[in-house]
Amino acid sequence: MEVDPSPSPPSSRPPPLPGYFDPESSGRREEYRRYRKRMSSSNVSPLLGSSLSKSSEARLLYDGGSIPRRPNAGLLLEDIKQEAQDYSNLEGLDGSRMFSSAKRRASLDGGSASDAAYSSGRQAARQTLKPVKMEDDMYVPHEGETSFTMFASLLDSAIQGLMPFPDVILQFERTCRNASDSIRSAATGKLRVVEDKLMQQKAQLLLDEAASWSLLWCLYGKGNEDLSEELFVPPTTSHQEACRFVAVDLTAQLCLRIVLWLEGLASEALDLEKKVRGSHVGSYLPSSGVWHRTQRYLKRNNNDSTIVKHVDFDAPTREGAQLLPDDKKQDELLLEDIWTLLRAGRLEEASELCRSAGQAWRAATLCPFGGIDMFPSLDALLRNGKSRTLQAIELESGIGRQWRLWKWASYCASEKIAEQDGGCYEMAVYALQCSNLKRVLPICMDWESACWAMARSWLDVQVDLVLSQYQTSRPDGRQLDDDMNGAQNSVGPESWPYHVLDQQPRNITALLQNLHSSDFVHENVSRACREQHRQIEMNLMSGDIAHLLDLLWSWLSPAEEDQNTARPLDDPEMIRFGAHVVLVLRYIFSDEIEDELEEKLVTVGDLIINLYVRYLFSEDQEELVGVYASQLQRDLCINLFVEMMELRLNSSLHTMYKLFLSAVEYLPFSSGDAMVIQWLCFTPPPSIPDFQMITGKLLIRALMHSNTLFREFSLISMRRVPELPAGPHKLLAILAEPLKQKENLISPEDQEVSDNLQEFEDWHEYYSLDATYRNWLKVEMQNAAVSPDMLSAEENDQAVAAAKETLELAFLLLKKDERPWLDAVESSPFEPSQPIFLELHACAMLCLPSGECMLPDATSCTALTSALYSTANEEDVLHRQLKVDVQVSSRDPCCIEVALRCLAAEGDGYGLHEASDGGLLAAIMAAGFKGELSRFQPGVSMAISRLDAWYSDGNGSVESTAAYIIRGLCRRCCLPETILRSMQACISLSAAGNSLDDCDKLIELVGSSESGMLHLFSQQQLQEFLIFERECLISKMELEEEQLSSDS
């Protein structure tokens, strides 16, 4: 349903924001909100569109065996929770279980293809948040499981992509109904009168909430129904034209959805009444409506002029007489049940009830034209099938003529019954068929019935106006204006529907205002408009989402003089409802939303969610807070977790660990968050069993994750500027102290552990060299800004010392004796007989040579795809089935998602990878990182934010990680840059009169076939290297000339 969600100016000033919430805190907001649409978590490869099979179960912590390679940053966090299950039998200090079952969840910052691939190996079930069945009927909650837990479970499933949000709305409704039924059944006959009344009120409030969820689905979750042309048999009928109009007109579609929603609620109420009381409307004896008592009276005596002389159905109206009181009462009871069934949208049951009561003529007035359902909906169109009854009628009389006659006859009947002071339900039944609203509303004693009558009447009149266009003789414009203003000069069917036009609202706002007015509706209806869920539903109908958010916050916010949000809350159910409405609306409106409403959903929405998180925390539901806190603005989420941890410092170990697991699972980590390592370095209390083993395993996880981050940091810190990249050095500082104790915590004898320790040492060397080079560059730039005559000897010596230190560290890294730096030699686990593919997925930003971000679009993505293809030769593209896919990221419009895929080959996917350069995919991606794509904008490079590679089968299912590709890519980018930086330092030293021996060593190193350095250079890097070499030669020649001149 395309209801305009744009906010209208609220009638009153929005409630004040509490002091603890500052929209501008901790820097500017993220440009792309967390609630934006995520890529599906259904484990689908973007290149193939097929599901990825589950990878083999992996052990997280070191247990004497091997540790699987996991280069994905988000995956390492997931594995922490998985392995926690192995320790669920450890006893806490208070005897309770310390570890809960392992939790699984896709990374909130994820959603990329790589996350989808790796998440396929994670279990989706949890102990605290139970799995959600996808069947039509939701499972019944276990005893003791609260609606709060159920809602959290459903929401978490939707955020992970396991269930569409429209389906989640329906599950929210069903959860409320189930909870209401449970309360009613539990309270029946078991409580005192006052307690029973309170429980019944609570059950009714849950039904009201279920109604609000149902409306939200009808208006915003239900998809648009397309009418297939196959349903239309030419020539079209009035009913088909009515359905076609309602399908395309937004106002009519809104009315239709409101009518179907209210009829659905009434139908649910009938089913509940039948279940609870065992009664059902329409349960009459056959032929109970044929006026037996009046027939017997007429056989004995027919002298009473007030009693009808005949018993045909027109007799009371024709003769102006009445039935016997008993028959009249029986008729009124029958019509009351007919009205109840029509109110619930059960037209067939109402017609069958008439027939079973012996009043087939009344059934014909409800379903004219041979029993065809004339309601303008797709369901009615499908039920009618390709019946030609109406078509045959209208071929003779014209489209809509019989329709107007039926409406006019129903109108006349309702007015005649009202004049004769007949039964109110009979009057309402006929008035409903013709939109005679003033004869319907008197029996609408509740809000739902009045709203239904108005929406149904308005919908029918809109349809009648459209069908009136097919009328051959119509009143002129002046007469129509008079009719619309209430001057009904024409009383025949030709002027229909102008008889009732003045009774209809002009828009949805007018309809809602009529519900408030006691002049139009019963006082119970206008009083119900002040109820909370009725106000929520009216705001949803009008599409005023901004006012709805202000309304919710005005109900939930603490008083201005009491900004303590940790105080006891009066209505936790409404707080829960408000938080979930905000989150559902964020996801539903993620693609099409105005800036004003988007800001309202963030600011006011975060206030409501924050309030709900604090309520859950106050109720000791720490395991649930992460689901909701993770949807807050990033800085607010982290600050909230910090505050909660401080409040739980003196709590039991079990409580603190629940909060720790929730933080690790749900805090908005990204691949650049060094805080992840601090979480992984969490040290369990020494009092628990196997304390040292658990600590060591956590340290191994921290070590593996830091290597993943180091690789990604290295690819975004290639620019030659003096500013030091903070991320990698912060990681080194965090891990420095724990790794001093590594001999006591972990065993380096395991090959996997040894490889990770060695890679960590390699990165430690690299970033030490990087810091030294940037320090030299800073000194060099400061000296260059001063005239050489003004430089002191100390300043010159400082620059020379920094350059020499840079070269010294560079040669230690480039000429390692034992093994090359970041050795990417790896043996493939697959045989050539197996058809294996290699995949590399990256999320990156496009950066201009100036360092500014370039906003991607479809055109630039297409150009980049072509440029990446051009980096490979034609033979590789064809024989290795290379595929390249570049798209704008669905999570961040400033980023692109790049997916590369190719067939494995000998030495690159099969056998031993000896080149240590990452193979074909690394070569293609390196060109993008270096900004050397020949068919793309010159100088534009890719700044990586997430990078993963793996083996997959022909269907795209992940088989194993391929870390050698990422390591080889780092070698392709880092080693040439290190050599160029070293050449830069050599030239600086030569200008200071130092020897050029180091320059000769670098040239020899690059030219040596044993080092394998030459093929790591790109064409532009080689050109730059040759320029540096030329400068070295010139400097050497100048030095030789100076020596000759000095000797002579």
Image: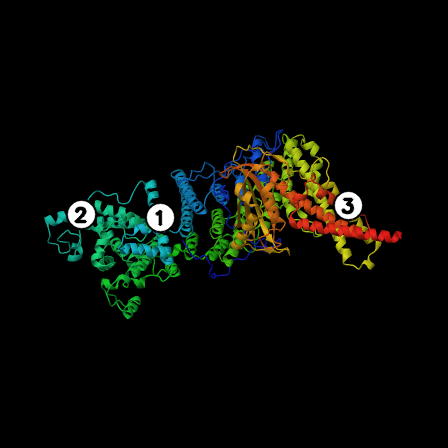
Residue placed furthest toward the bottom: 478
Task: Decide: is 244 above or below 755.
Answer: below
Tag 3 secondary structure: helix
| Badge 3 amino acid | Asp
State the colouring used for the structure image.
rainbow
Front residue (pair 578, 122): 122
Tag 1 secondary structure: helix
Tag 2 secondary structure: loop
Q: Which residue is mark 2?
A: 290
Q: Position of residue 256 (x, y in %)?
A: 35, 54
* Closer mark to the observer between disc 1 and disc 2: 1
Q: What is the CA distance from the residue labelled 2 to the residue labelled 3?
A: 115 Å
Q: Which residue is mark 1?
A: 264
Residue placed furthest toward the right: 1048
Q: What is the CA distance from the residue labelled 3 to the residue labelled 1?
A: 84 Å
Q: Tell me where residue 98 sits by quadrant.
A: top right
Q: Earlier in the sequence, mark 3 or mark 1?
A: 1
- Mark 1 near mark 2, Cβ–Cβ under 8 Å? no
| Badge 1 amino acid | Gly
In the figure, is residue 559 to the left or right of 700?
left
| Badge 2 amino acid | Val
Q: Residues within 10 Å of mark 1 (few under 14, many from 20)?
A: some
Q: Residues within 10 Å of mark 3 (few under 14, many from 20)?
A: many
Q: Position of residue 783 (x, y in %)?
A: 78, 56
Q: Which residue is mark 3?
A: 998
Task: Decide: is 657 above or below 989.
Answer: above
Q: Position of residue 391 (x, y in %)?
A: 24, 54
